[in-house]
Structures are given as C-alpha cells and as structure tokens.
Image: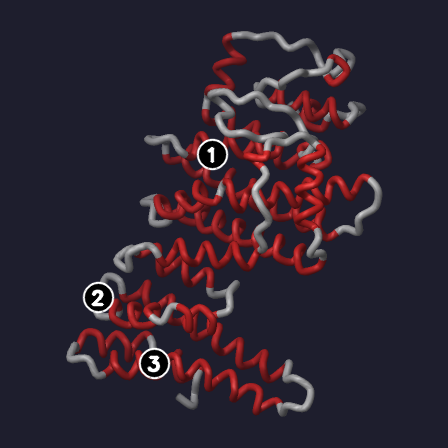
Amino acid sequence: MVALIEGAGMPRQQRAVALAVRALDIKIHNLDKSSEPSESYLPPLVSSTNHKNCMDDAVSMICIARAIVSLASYETTLVALDIEPSIRIPSICNNVHEAVFTHIASICGRSQLAPGVKIIVFESMAIWLQETAKLLARCLGEVQRGEERDMHAMAFALGQRVLILQRERIMGYLWSYWDDPIDAVQVKVRTIFEAFLDIGSTMNQAIIVNPAIAESALTHTDSAGQSKATSPGAQDGNAFLSDVLDLVLTMDWSRKVKYSLLAALCARINVLDMLTGHTDILTSCLETMAQVTMASRAGQLLTALLSRAADDIRCAREQAPDGEEEEAAALRVETAHMALWKGPVTAALCRDDDTSRRMLTQQLLPALFEALPRI
C-alpha cells in the first residue's frame, strides 16, 4: 500500500490513476491506456471477495484514506481525473484528494458506529481538513512559475469547492456531534471546525494578495473540462466567515453548541462589527446567565468577546495611525466597545432575578472590568 501511495518511479498522472483505481476502488471515465499504471510498477488488479470486503469495511477505508492524505504528494492528489459517480462516490469530484474526502464523509454519516471507530473517523475528517488547509497555504503562498500556476489555480478551486459545496455537510457535523457523549469525538469535531475556518482564512489571504486569482481558477476549471455545476463562483474568506456566522446565529439560543461556535468565531472576525450588526447576541447571552445549566456556555462566549475587546484596544494602542496619539487611539476603540456593553449589562444587573445577578457577578464582571476598566 505504501509503495502504491508513494508511486516511486511512476509519472504523476499514472500515480493519480493508480490511487483512484487501486486504493480507492473508483472508476475513471475514458481511461487512456497510457495513463494506466504499468505492471512493472504494480501487479495487475485482481478483483476478489477479500478486496471487496476491505473496501466495504469502515476501518479499512479510513486507514487507506488516512494513508493517502498523509503520504501522497499534493502534486499527485490534485491531478484532474474524470471520476465516474458511484455508490461510493455519489458526489461529483475530479481528483483523488476530494475522492478521499467523499470516502471519509460517507462513513461520518453512518449511524451506530462503534465508539473507537467513531473517534478514528472524525479524527480522519479533521486530518483531511487540516492537510487541505496546509496544502492551500503552501500552494497559494508560492510564487507562480510555469506549472505552478496550474497548481495554484487547482488549489484555489479546491478551496472554493470545500467552502461552498461541502459547507452544509461539515456544519452538520458540528450541529450533531459538538456535544457528543464521547469526549474524544467532541475534541475532533472542534478540530474540524478550526480547520474549516483555517481554510476560509487562507482563501481570504490569497484573494487579498492576488484579487485576480478567482478568475484564474475558473479559467483553469473551464480549460480542464470540469462541469460548471462543480465550479462555484468566487467567494472570499470574509464572505465565508459572514455566512458561517449567519448559520450559527440561526440556531436557537437553547442549544449549547451555539455559544461554543460563536466563541470560536470571535478569534477570526471583527467583534465590533458583529455586535453592532447583531445586537441580540449580548442581550441573549446575559439572559441565559440566569439558567444555571447554560450559564457556563454563555459565560464562555462573553469572556471570548471581552478578550477580543481587550486585544482590539491593545492593537489600537500599538498601531495608532500617523498623527494620532497611542492613548487616544486606544480610547477611541475602548469607547466603541463600552457603548455596546454598557446598556445590556446595566439592564441585566437591574433585573429582578437573584440567580442572574449572582452568575453575572461571578462569571462576567471580573472579566468585564479587566477588559474595559473605564466602563
């Protein structure tokens, strides 16, 4: 298996075909004989009951998928292939890297997985997303020369498809498994979310550096003959984060996962803009503090918001514009944050609810006065 994945001595196209046909057991449309792996490198493919059982077994599939992600070079896994849709590959994809995602996702969606298998499956999904983020950072961060331009465009198109076509599926894992009874699964799902956001951040940075990259990726997609149905329009990282935020905010405030997801997003978005555009966030969190079972989750989000406020003030002081004093710049940002917090906090403290006031005193006020001492 390692020799197949590494494909020593095989041309890139043959390595990609070998991984698709031999390792992932998928079919390629109009496969040219010249693209098939030579028998001098690999023995003839023999269909057998053991081979079929191996590909139908969840653990075997995951082990193969993880080996490809860990060992195969992205120059091979991103080679364009005309993959034939099947039960194993129901969605349209055009390279080995995305085919691996489809394999892993097909197992993530299975019910009644054994606890050990469930952990491995979600860890594998997290690894795939992490490796994709690294792949994008490497490809999109390189200077484009010759063939690297094609790789640059292919990587950007891959990022677009992950952010747009796979978003609903990945967010579904968060809704369903964030509070899974198995602690290890919770950890893996959090890693999935962080890696997904990393992909969005990398794509955003690529667009900032080269605004024309989206058009270049679409041009490459058309020249490669990829279906327009799988060629999503350009979406920058800021729009992606805004869409994720909107998805999270549609959830009911009674769901614990909502507070954790918003807390994770705080590190990546403009908190002032978020609170200005969604004034109900602070109000709803402060109301939730009255519920003993939910107070810790609401407190986690409020603390994350205040931490970002403190960071914004510190950055304003360190990066004051020319002609503006450091303290004046910091005070301007602090005043903007205080204006958002003062009303909701005062209203919450004046509420006729001893439990709410006690929770606010214990979990909010110390962090509030530390972040915004002038409030």
Which quarter of the picture shows residue 168?
Answer: top left
Q: Earlier in the sequence, mark 1 or mark 2?
A: 1
User: Which mark is on residue 105?
Assistant: 1
Q: For mark 2, what is the residue?
A: 291
Q: Is residue 346 left or right of residue 58?
A: left
Cα–Cα span, label 1 and label 2: 36 Å
> Considering only vertical position in the picture, is 58 above or below 136?
above
Image location of residue 29, percent across then percent down: 63, 18
Cα–Cα span, label 3 and label 2: 17 Å
User: Which mark is on residue 250?
Assistant: none
In the image, what residue occupies the spot 60% across and 49% down?
Answer: 234
Point out the image quarter for the N terminus: top right
Q: Amino acid at mark 1?
A: Ala
Image location of residue 254, percent across then percent down: 26, 58
Mark in front: 1 vs 2 = 1
Q: Earlier in the sequence, mark 1 or mark 3?
A: 1
Q: Is residue 201 left or right of residue 365?
A: right
Which quarter of the picture shows residue 33?
Answer: top right
Q: For mark 3, what is the residue?
A: 365
Q: Nearer the viewer, residue 166 or 66?
A: 166
What kind of colouring is applied to the model shown? secondary structure
Point out the image quarter for the C terminus: bottom left
